[in-house]
Image: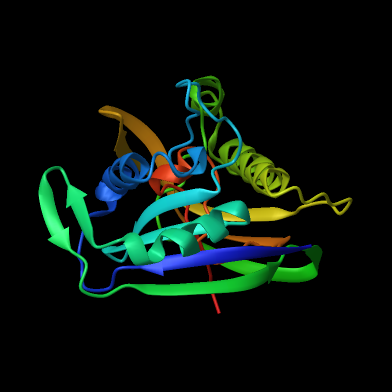
Amino acid sequence: MQITQTTIQFPDIQLQTRDAHKLRGYFGNLFKEHSPLLHNHYDDGSARYAYPLVQYKVIDRVPVLVGFQEGAGLLVSLFLKIRELDIEGQHIPVLAKNIQQKQCTLTVNQQLYNYSFKTLWMALNQENFRKYQQLDEAERGSFLNHQLQNNILSFYKGLSFRTNERIMVITRLEEKQTLFKNHSMLAFAGQFTSNAYLPEWAGIGKAVSRGFGTVSLIK
């Protein structure tokens, strides 16, 4: 299945990885009348629980917006209107911005793809965290493999891609602590191998609209 992906980068601006949620807040408010895809809330205030089709990231300190399908078209339509960033009251003029739109083919096949996490992967909700804590090291590896399989399936489902092929995953991860909504959370850094193709800088797992779980293909 082919999908459309749009990426906007601001190469002259340097931010911290933790600033990704501030990008989301700024753009979601600035263009709130355009689409709920920009902030994942409808006009009545209810949350849009589907996979985020517009994601806000800071990758290697560069602010990045990534859109898929309808979100990809939305970013193109707003590109020329982006003239500054407002990060907690700091107005940063946009002197340069790059946009790229491409077609990606989602597939699960016999080829193995190696990925790294460019931002921390939040794999566990509260219930899964309790289960994870009770496992030994070998069991934890299998548990995370299974979580990642589910996350990839959720990504595919969010883009209306269905596959009958079994998704295989092998992770090579290390535990990290991160702040999420002012709470310390367990997250993971590292790499994984899978027979599932994921577009560059797609987000998987929890809080992907805020930049978590961004994957990059190791070439």
Quadrant in the picture for residue 4: bottom right
Residue 191 seen anywhere in this rendered image of the structure: no
Q: Position of residue 18 (x, y in %)?
A: 26, 47
Residue 212 seen anywhere in this rendered image of the structure: yes
Establish if 77 lies above or below 90. Answer: below
Quadrant where the image shows the C terminus: bottom right
Q: Position of residue 73 (x, y in %)?
A: 56, 60
User: Which colour style is shown?
Assistant: rainbow
Q: Residue furthest bottom?
A: 219
Q: Residue at x 45, y 39 (%)?
A: 207
Quadrant in the picture for residue 58: bottom left
Residue 78 appears left or right of 137: left
Q: Residue at x 47, y 61 (%)?
A: 77
Residue 117 appears left or right of 164: left
Residue 179 appears left or right of 209: left
Q: Nearer the viewer, residue 173 or 44?
A: 44
Q: Nearer the viewer, residue 26 or 134?
A: 26
Q: Nearer the viewer, residue 141 or 66?
A: 66
Q: Residue furthest right?
A: 164
Quadrant where the image shows the N terminus: bottom right
Establish if 147 lies above or below 74. Answer: above
